[in-house]
Image (cartoon, rainbow, N blue to C red):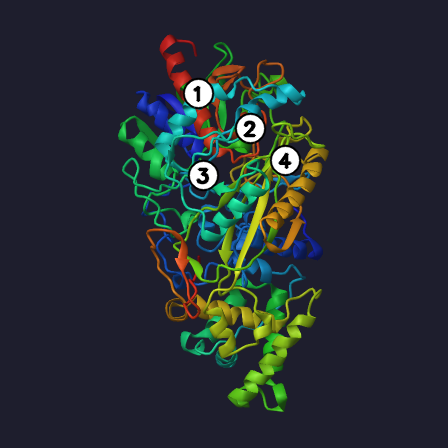
């Protein structure tokens, strides 16, 4: 098989991201973007119920309504099943950071404090260009967005989804406020 | 063990094999269709085709398990949680890369006809003449006119939707009504046509999706889930189209789980007597006899079977006397193009998910245009409005993010070029007998790369894309060459080319192996050059043509 070093892997991820753009698609949250090739880290801890509770609240802060669709369990599953060991480890470390944030920990913060904290983390993402690993908050944000908008509630209430459209109209009327399609 | 006798054996059940089975059974021949993988039943076998987005646990993203079992397929973007079961478990079937080669395989009934891109274009007359005219490799032994009636034949049955354009470089065919360019694409198309005085054209893709009911099959429902298998039978696949036709004759026996290890060659008759099959369940081998054999196992697998056949006569295998078996391996080189942002059209959106895009036919090195390379390229792309998965970093998190992503973003357009790759004797695949796969079969070893002609062409592929988008008023246009390794287009061709002479080609003008005229190779292996258009329609036409010839030859006792 073709040996792939980290640089090659990064350029592949970048390539895939760009090809999706070129082909007119988009794939934020794709494992191709998230999956790194760094050295495996051993003994990754499994997610606990408390972890999922914390992730539920983090998810809810990123996308209100996502706790109701079980975003904590979704994030934990995705990280366990789809992420590389390095990303899994970075995600877990990030979770611990948030668990101790502001000295009191994320769960003890008021909704306003949680939003302010995660907006800070979000703003920091723009400084992460060139890093070898995906910043943990980027993973959390991508997973919250993916988990919510691809859920039944997200698909059908925040977005529109018709499983069998049956026809195509390439000039369909749109007015501001109309929901986006889940995919188009 | 000895199996039964048949009139014809078809090896492989993908696009080419399905056509061979249909044409031969309809001509009254008793046919054994061999497939190395499992059966996938039409409709009931498409396990993920009717699932809602939220019913796929990982929301269609790849899992580590898929990556581990399918290390090659997951190199690229087309595999996902929903269709991963249609791509081969690479782990079981390794190969050697002396140079990088992405070999994307589908080992099951239907082969890659289940997951193909469905873009269907005729070659043009210049494509068949170019090798001779330019002194490249060897001349095609056929011309466009030889194949034109067979394009008619396969298009009429398969159902290809497309627009009539009257372009010499992209001949019109027997089309169903075209799909529709969307409002932004129509605008870009009009601007490009006018800017280049009609010498360049953006048209709707010609695609093997039905726009109206056809031959008892339903029309496309605009779900854009083709790669999961279509429960409506709305795109051409072996399952939806050729297999039911072959079954209907009562002349077909389909045998899945059957790896063809070699063609059995009768030295005295200088003919194949049949094939040897390894049953992947029982691990027993069986010999099946037939009067003719159609090798349609795919460009690389068919070459591999030939290399493993008649080695007592030719150490490098059946068809190797020319010195060309396994050589002249080609693909389309791509992953270069441009993208940008389209302003306006905020009051326009789309309804339905169109499994198709636009196509810009070749315009380079034609009609007096002369570049510093040979041949040309075409573009495929689309304009779309961004969705919830777009990046909106500036908005922050919380309700503003949720509300922003609940509405579509702006329009963008992107396109990527597919370029012709010249045949070269140096680009080859061989059998490495020192390494075997799960079934004990020797593995293929790849030694193939693009050359200076392709590298020069890629500059145009990037620059022309950006220039056209800019001419059409697109903003923030970025062109890019993201690099390429052979195989990535999944348009592999060559390895057993057709030609005029047994000294320089493996197959004659009827796809017969020169050294065993009752063996026909009609998949991508037979190609003597690649054109720049998607190849599957041409495999269909070549297969139907060769099958008709084989039936006549059998009647006359010529094979």
Percent coordinates x, y for residue B238 in the rendering: 38, 36
Mark 1 closeness class: few <14, some 14–19, many ≥20 residues within 10 Å: many
Chain under disc 4:
B
Q: Nearer the viewer, residue B378 or B303?
A: B378
- 1 or 4: tag closer to the N-terminus: 4
| Real-space Cα separation, disc 2 to disc 3, in angstroms | 30 Å
**Callout in the foreground (1, 4):** 1
| Real-space Cα separation, disc 1 to disc 3, in angstroms | 24 Å
**Callout in the foreground (3, 4):** 3
- Inspect this view and state whether residue B135 appears: yes
Q: Which residue is mark 3?
A: B206
Q: Could you say whether the residue bearing mark 1 is in a helix, strand or loop?
A: helix
| Real-space Cα separation, disc 2 to disc 1, in angstroms | 18 Å
Q: Could you say whether the residue bearing mark 3 is in a helix, strand or loop?
A: loop
Chain under disc 2:
B
- 2 or 1: tag closer to the N-terminus: 2
């Amino acid at each position: 098989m073709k040996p792939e070093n980290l640089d090659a892997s990064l350029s592949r991820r970048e390539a895939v991201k760009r090809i999706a753009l070129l082909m007119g698609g988009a794939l934020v949250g794709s494992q191709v973007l998230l999956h790194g090739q760094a050295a495996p880290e051993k003994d990754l801890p499994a997610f606990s119920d408390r972890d999922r509770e914390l992730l539920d609240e983090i998810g809810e802060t990123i996308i209100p309504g996502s706790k109701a669709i079980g975003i904590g369990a979704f994030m934990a599953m995705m990280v366990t099943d789809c992420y590389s060991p390095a990303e899994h480890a970075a995600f877990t470390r990030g979770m611990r950071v948030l668990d101790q944030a502001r000295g009191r920990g994320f769960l003890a913060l008021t909704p306003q404090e949680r939003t302010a904290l995660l907006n800070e983390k979000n703003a920091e993402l723009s400084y992460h260009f060139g890093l070898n690993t995906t910043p943990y908050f980027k993973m959390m944000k991508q997973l919250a967005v993916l988990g919510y908008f691809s859920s039944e509630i997200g698909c059908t209430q925040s977005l529109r989804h018709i499983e069998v459209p049956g026809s195509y109209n390439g000039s369909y009327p749109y007015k501001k406020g109309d929901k986006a399609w889940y995919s188009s | 063990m000895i199996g039964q006798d048949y009139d014809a054996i078809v090896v492989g059940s993908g696009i080419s094999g399905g056509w061979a089975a249909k044409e031969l059974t309809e001509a009254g021949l008793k046919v054994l269709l061999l497939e190395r993988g499992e059966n996938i039943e039409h409709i009931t076998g498409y396990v993920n085709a009717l699932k809602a987005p939220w019913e796929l646990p990982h929301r269609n993203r790849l899992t580590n398990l898929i990556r581990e079992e399918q290390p090659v397929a997951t190199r690229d973007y087309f595999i996902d949680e929903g269709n991963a079961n249609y791509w081969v478990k690479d782990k079981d079937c390794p190969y050697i890369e002396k140079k990088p080669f992405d070999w994307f395989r589908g080992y099951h009934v239907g082969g890659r006809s289940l997951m193909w891109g469905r873009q269907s274009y005729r070659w043009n007359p210049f494509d068949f003449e170019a090798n001779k005219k330019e002194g490249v490799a060897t001349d095609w032994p056929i011309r466009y006119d030889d194949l034109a009636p067979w394009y008619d034949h396969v298009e009429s049955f398969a159902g290809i939707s497309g627009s009539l354009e009257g372009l010499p470089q992209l001949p019109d065919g027997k089309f169903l009504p075209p799909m529709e360019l969307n409002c932004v694409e129509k605008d870009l198309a009009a601007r490009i046509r006018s800017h280049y005085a009609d010498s360049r054209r953006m048209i709707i893709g010609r695609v093997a999706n039905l726009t109206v009911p056809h031959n008892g099959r339903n029309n496309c429902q605009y779900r854009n889930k083709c790669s999961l298998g279509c429960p409506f039978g709305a795109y051409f696949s072996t399952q939806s189209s050729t297999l039911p036709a072959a079954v209907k004759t009562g002349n077909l026996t389909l045998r899945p789980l059957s790896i063809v290890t070699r063609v059995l060659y009768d030295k005295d008759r200088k003919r194949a007597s049949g094939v040897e099959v390894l049953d992947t369940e029982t691990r027993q081998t069986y010999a099946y006899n037939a009067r003719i054999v159609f090798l349609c196992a795919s460009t690389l697998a068919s070459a591999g079977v030939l290399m493993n056949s008649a080695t007592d006569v030719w150490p490098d295998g059946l068809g190797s006397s020319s010195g060309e078996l396994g050589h002249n391996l080609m693909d389309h080189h791509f992953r270069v193009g441009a993208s940008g942002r389209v302003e306006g059209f905020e009051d326009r959106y789309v309804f339905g998910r169109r499994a198709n895009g636009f196509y810009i036919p070749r315009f380079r090195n034609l009609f007096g245009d002369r570049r510093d390379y040979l041949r040309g390229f075409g573009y495929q792309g689309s304009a779309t409005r961004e969705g919830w998965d777009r990046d909106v970093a500036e908005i922050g998190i919380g309700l503003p993010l949720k509300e922003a992503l609940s509405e579509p973003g702006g329009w963008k357009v992107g396109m990527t070029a597919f370029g012709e790759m010249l045949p070269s004797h140096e680009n080859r695949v061989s059998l490495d007998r020192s390494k075997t796969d799960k079934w004990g079969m020797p593995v293929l070893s790849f030694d193939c790369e693009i050359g200076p002609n392709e590298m020069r062409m890629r500059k145009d592929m990037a620059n022309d894309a950006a220039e056209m988008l800019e001419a059409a008023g697109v903003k923030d246009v970025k062109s890019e060459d993201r690099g390429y390794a052979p195989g990535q287009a999944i348009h592999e061709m060559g390895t057993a080319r057709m030609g005029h002479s047994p000294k320089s080609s493996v197959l004659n003008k009827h796809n017969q192996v020169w050294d065993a005229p009752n063996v026909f190779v009609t998949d991508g292996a037979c190609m003597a050059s690649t054109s720049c258009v998607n190849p599957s329609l041409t495999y269909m036409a070549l297969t139907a043509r060769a099958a008709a010839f084989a039936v006549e030859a059998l009647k006359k006792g010529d094979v």
